[in-house]
Amino acid sequence: MLLLEQAGEYVLLMQRALSKPDKWAVFRNQLMNEFTNLGIDSIGIVAIISVFMGAVVSIQTAYNIDSPLIPLTMVGFTARQSVILEFSPTIISLILAGKVGSRIASEIGSMKISQQIDALQVLGVNPANFLIFPKIIASVLINPVLIIFSIFMSLAGGYLIAQLTDLYTPQDYVTGLRYSFSAFTVFYAIIKTVVFAFIISSVSGYHGYKVKGGALQVGQASTNAVVHSSIGIILFNLILTQLLLT
C-alpha cells in the first residue's frame, strides 16, 4: 500500500511540475543554472570514470582473446559495442544518479524544511514547477551530451592502452572501432539516456519535495532518491533493451 501511495503522490507531483511555467524569463534563468549544476559540474567525474572504464574493457577483451583465429581488431569492436550499448548510458547514469540525484533531493529538501517552498506558495508560485521542471528539462537535454562525451573518452581510454602496452596495436584497435558500425547503437544509447535522465531528476525531485522533519530527514531523502533512481534505471534498462534490440 505504501508503494502505491508513493506512486500516486509521484504522479500527482509530476502533473504539477510539468505544467506550463508562469514566467518564461524566470524559467530560462533557472534552466541555465541547472545546466551548470547538473551537467557542466559533472564533466570531470564522467571523464575520469569513462577513460578508465574504456581502458579496463579493452584490457579484459585483449586478455580473453587466446585464439590465433580471432583477430585483435575484435578488441576495438568489442570495446565500442560494450561502451555504446551499455557502459556509458547505464553506468554513467547510475553515477549521475548518485551525484546529481542526491544534490537535487537535498537542495529541494532543504528548501522544504526551511519553509521556502511554503513561501513560494504564499506568493502564488507553483513550487513544483518552479523547482523541479527546470531540473528535469536540463537533465534530459544535458545528459545525452555527457553520455556522448563519455563514449568518446571511453574509446580514447582503449586507444591509450594500445599506445602504452603491446596487447594490441593502435591500428588494430581503430580498425575494430570502424568495423560494422551501426548508427542505431548511438541512437539507442541516447534514448536510454533521456529516459534515465527523467527518472533521476523526477524521482529525486519527488523525494526532496516530500521531506518532512529536519536535516536527518533530508539525508534520508537523498539516500532514497539515489536508491530509487538506481532501481528505476536498472528496470527501464531491461525494458528498453527488450523493446529496442529484439
Image (cartoon, grey):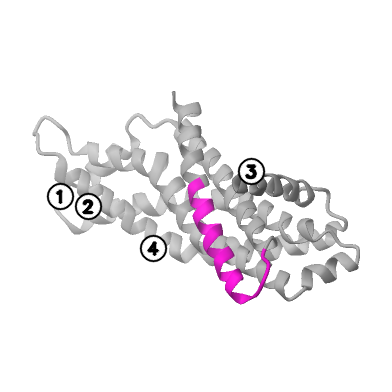
Give amino acid for label 3.
Leu
Dot 3 corresponds to which residue? 4
* Residue 159 appears in view: no
Classify 156 as above or below 108: above
Dot 1 corresponds to which residue? 167
**What residue range appears in magenta?**
211-231
Query: Do the CB atoms of the residues marked 2 and 1 lie less than 8 Å apart?
Result: yes
Give amino acid for label 4.
Ile
- Residue 95 sits in which quadrant? bottom left
Marks 1/3: CA–CA distance = 53 Å
Dot 1 crowding, Cα within 10 Å, few <14, some 14–19, many 20+? some
Please indicate whether residue 23 sits to the left or right of residue 144 in the image. right
Q: Which mark is residue 48?
A: 4
Marks 4/3: CA–CA distance = 39 Å
Query: Do the CB atoms of the residues marked 4 and 3 lie less than 8 Å apart?
Result: no
Marks 2/3: CA–CA distance = 52 Å
